[in-house]
Image (cartoon, coloured by chain):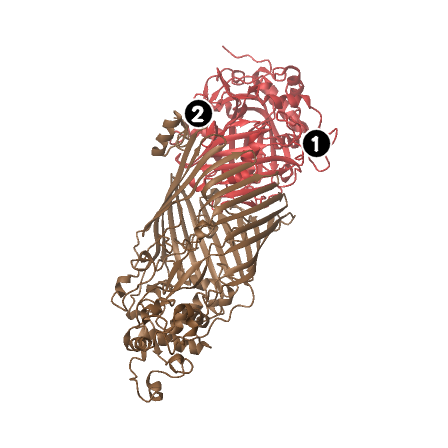
Chain colours: A brown, B red
Amino acid sequence: MKGDRNMQRTQRRVGATLGVLALAITGNAVHAGEAGGFFDDMNINFAGFVRAESAISTTGQENPNNQGGNIFNSQTVARTAYLPPALGGGQWGAIPLGVGGNQQLGGLLPPIAFTDEVRRGDFIDADDNAFNYTILRAETEMQLTLTDHWSVIGRLRAIYDPTIYQQFNPGSVGGVQGAIDGGEKRLYKGRPNMFEYIVEGGDKPNPLEWSGKDYLVYFPALLAEYTSGGLNLRVGNQQLAWGQSIFFRVFDVANGLDLRRHLIMDRALEEFSDKRVPQLSVRLSYQLSDTILLDSFVAKFQPTVFGNPNTPYNVIPAQFTVHDLYKEGGYDSKLNYGLRLKGDYGQVSFQLMATRRYNPDGVFRWTESGVQKPLSGLLGTAVNLAYSVKPQLGNPDNAGACSPTLCRLYDDISEALSHTPFEASPAGVYSAREWFNYAAQVRLDGVAGLNAAIEEFAASRDVFATPADNYDQAYAELDTFFIAAGGSMRGHIARQYFREDVFGVGASYVNESENDLLNQMIFNLEVQYTPERTFTNKGLSRNFVKQDEYTVSLVVDKWHRFFNEFPGTYILFQALTKNRSDLVGRHLGGFGGSENKEAPGKSGNSNYLVLGFLQPWPNKIYEIEFAALVDLEGGMLAQPGLRWNAGKSVTVEGFYNFVDGRLWGNPNDNLLSTIDFAEEFTLRVSYQF
Amino acid sequence: MPYLTRYGRGFTRRKFLTDAARGVLATGVLAPLASSMAASGEITKAYPDELLSIEGYTKGRIKTGDFITSANVELVKDLLEPVRYEHILNHGRRLKVVKTTQDLMRLSPWEYIEATLKNAGKAGFDAKGNVVNKADGRPWIGGNPFPDPTNGLELFAAQTLSWGRHDASFYALTAQALGRNGEPRFNYSGGWAELSPVARVSMQPAPYWPGHEDKLRFQSVFFQTPSQFSGTSFLNVWDYDHSRFPDLYGYVPEFRRVRQFPTDQRFEPLLPGLSLYLSDAWAAGDPLHTWSGYQIVGRGPFLAGLAGNWNPGDPNWEQGVHGGPKNQSFWDTSVELVPEAIVVEAMPTRFPRAPVSKKRVWFDARNQIVIGMVTYDRRGQPFRSFDGAYSLYESGDDKFMDGAHPYWSWCHVTASDVQTGDVTRLQQVKALPGNHRSGANDETFYHRYLTQQALIKLGAA
């Protein structure tokens, strides 16, 4: 018997063309060495794996960003409506339309319907899921080598989610407030859509990607490669990663992230290997000398992909309807480009990077809902009536000429509301408490958010909304409109993208010492500087925040042998500081809010520490992993894990995500409270072929 | 017919023992080996008949062409490391005996041997312990610097200086890890590349690649299968300073980029199941002075694979296997009687808590090539055993050329974990998908395998 033929995927010599065709079917590797001419060197190779992945929640906590996990589903909240200042109410909150206010108005209005108690769960079914995540994944990588210089590389990834989850059904609120109306139907009208990334206009913008509600098939890489000497050229759909930092994206700026599947909850040491959004790119790298590598790219801009509404790891509260302007804003034809020089001189190395890109995370602002629907309920009917009795003397193009008290801009209140960022629909925000709570959760300012929605939309003022001077006024105004809406209001936000220049400089030093603990310790410092970076305004205003941002990371790597019987432990320590935003790019100005106050913003930097280690067993059959991300404002994500290389092409991985965003301080000051819900154990079983 | 010898086994044994007791190393029994080979290119004048053929050694009870099996292994027990003996005795391993190679030029790459003869006597150690050309104190100029070694350090210095004895090599390889039950548990394929910027004898410019005289070698390893490790690659850049650890860069598929890694832990399993460490490479995988001791602890004849191990009958040079519970634990191997092996022990003094307390390495006195290694755990118990097979890649009418001469290289290695019974089999194959072809002295190896950009190219897309 000849050894190891299975391992080799059988390198049979066959006629080149037929061989390639045969291989496309069989998945074997073929050398076409006996054929003549151009195909002399042609061969093809396949490898891949299938993997079942599931994550079971250990706390029973649902994602609060989803309808079924909204923390107000189980809370009864009192609401009071007030007479709008535009109708003579003075300041918001001065004249309640309930019992007290009725007296001030001489008993003109009945108290009932102007104060109420609302329990969100009376409208929305709460979810109760054991599993956060269950998918079946198959990946294969193919390399077709044409000559010593030319090859084609393709990596295909297919994911199926059987969606065994209890999830929000928009049909359940179909009879309330006229049902959810706005937004892309495939995202907001039906069952949660696990995988389709759909932007305004209905397009699915990711190239070489095919997706449905429960499946995703795409090419993370499909490229032609030319190589000659020190030159390497790759053209096609691909990802690119730079930098020494792991998880901290200081130099890793070329691609956005695909957060549709398991957010950032996968094995920490895997980093973003399956999460960088591939881009149609040209990548040219050239080894200038032994020590200096030049790497560059030009890429068609592709944005970060967030989880869809009501999917397990959605991070945008489902009370919002998002209008992604990637296509309508013309961003789909934009290019990113960048250049990096990396020099290694043994103990010392350096990196320089300059990238001009559209920030793939994008920024958000209020946008017109486009939903023509009147208010409802007794108060809503009264407002509708109050609106309709105003003479239509103004027009939207010259709104300033028309006092909202005396004239209206639109034919009716439905049309007016369609020009506000709100729709009077179910499954939105039901109370001012919910508004402020969620504003703080997503690092926005509840008062500024309300005011921007009024000041920047004449239609909002046209329906008697006026800017609030403080939290109390905003609270009163919000509750008034939620009652007038007949239950809740959904907010509409637009996502758009801005160009930025990202510069990076880095250096590393390998310490050599007689002290074993210090010997071969690698220190790496990376600095990113972005002038005039555009951030989401904490009020979702269209006046985005533009500020210079720096990011600094320090990485220390070390292999150290603690035990005689075990291989060395790989230890990684990282620290990161950013002066304008948190780890995921949310501006610090929106930090520190709560249900009871607007966001004061964070005055200092956001700071993070990472400690990770990897301890293999002898022969590496087992590997213990640990990684912890600590937000110095009081949050921690700790991930212990075990990998079992079982042999026979089987690998089993289990890891636990311990998340606590409430260790100390205001949870809304740290990153990890945002994913506090995702405490879970993940099991992955892979078979490689 | 009785097999008559002029000098009996007692004579040679006494000669080796006497030399050992005097603390001297003078290769050859009847005459100095180095000068005999330099004069005639053959070894016959240096050794008695009993050390020149298996027939002579076993008094005709084992003949060239026979297999050493459990039935006759006792006759050659003294010629084997304990693990190979155990494999043959109890696990069905067998070794085919071929004629002892007497032509020096068939025991290493042609140009390497020429340079060895040409540069004999020119090497020395400088104040830092680096091997230099004594004439100008610059790095070594090619060939074996110590063809007539006088101590263990010189043997290891030569081995560390040039692993594959080519200026540049690329080995397409496969590896299989088998458990005690003989079941294959892990299958891997990949490539190993090494290139010397100094002491060059075939590639131009020689002996130095200008601007790179401060480096000893560039070396990389990468894996193609299984998919979990596809694209995993590591690049070691060795300083010529024999005390400095190499710089280590790695492309880990999870990270999708090249990172620098600490390099002092060289006893880590590279991949699951493999009984191989970076430190094990060529029995001299670490910089020379990170180990110490280098004590000669024995001399004597040995059985090793030095010829007849290339398998051109397989289109990809894959070797046959046999033995073990599933009849696939061991490579089919041809061995020959090595007249004189020098056994050297060394200790890993720059590796605190290394799992290895010492290694014992067998060198063929004829060409100072490594022909066996056993490592010992920290309790002093045998830990792992390595035996391999080399060959000139010439068999009948089949030849695989390296320039003007047939290619000479290793063919396969067996690494056995003595304590667990696991076996790792490694073989050099002709090619892997992606046009990764085994060969030597190809200028393109540098850019294909030995730069950071090369790691990116080899990495998963």
Q: Give residue B132's mark.
A: 1
Asked if the residues shown at circle 1 and circle 2 are in contact, with their CB atoms under 8 angstroms apart, the answer is no
Which disc, if any, is residue A400?
Answer: none
Q: Are marks 1 and 2 on the same chain?
A: no
Residue A484 location in percent, x, y?
Answer: 32, 75
Q: In the rendered view, does B375 fall on the left or right side of A654?
A: right
Chain under callout 2: A
x then y, percent, for residue B114: 64, 21
- Quadrant for residue B236, please give it: top right
How crowded pointer 1 is (Cα within 10 Å; few <14, some 14-19, many 20+) is rated as some
Q: Secondary structure at mark 1?
A: strand
Question: Please, what is the three-letter code of the amino acid marked with disc 2?
Answer: Gly
Which quadrant of the rendered structure holds the C terminus of chain A?
Answer: top left
Label 2 belongs to which residue? A33
Q: Chain of mark 1?
A: B
From what the image shows, is residue A115 above or below residue A270? below
The amino acid at mark 1 is Val
Count of all numbered marks drawn on residues in the image? 2
| Drawn side of residue A96 relative to residue A445, left or right | left
Q: Distance from label 1 to label 2 (Cα)?
A: 43 Å
Residue B279 picture location, percent across and down: 56, 38
Residue depicted at 64% across the width and 33% down the height: B295
Q: Nearer the viewer, mark 1 or mark 2?
A: 2
Q: Secondary structure at mark 2?
A: loop
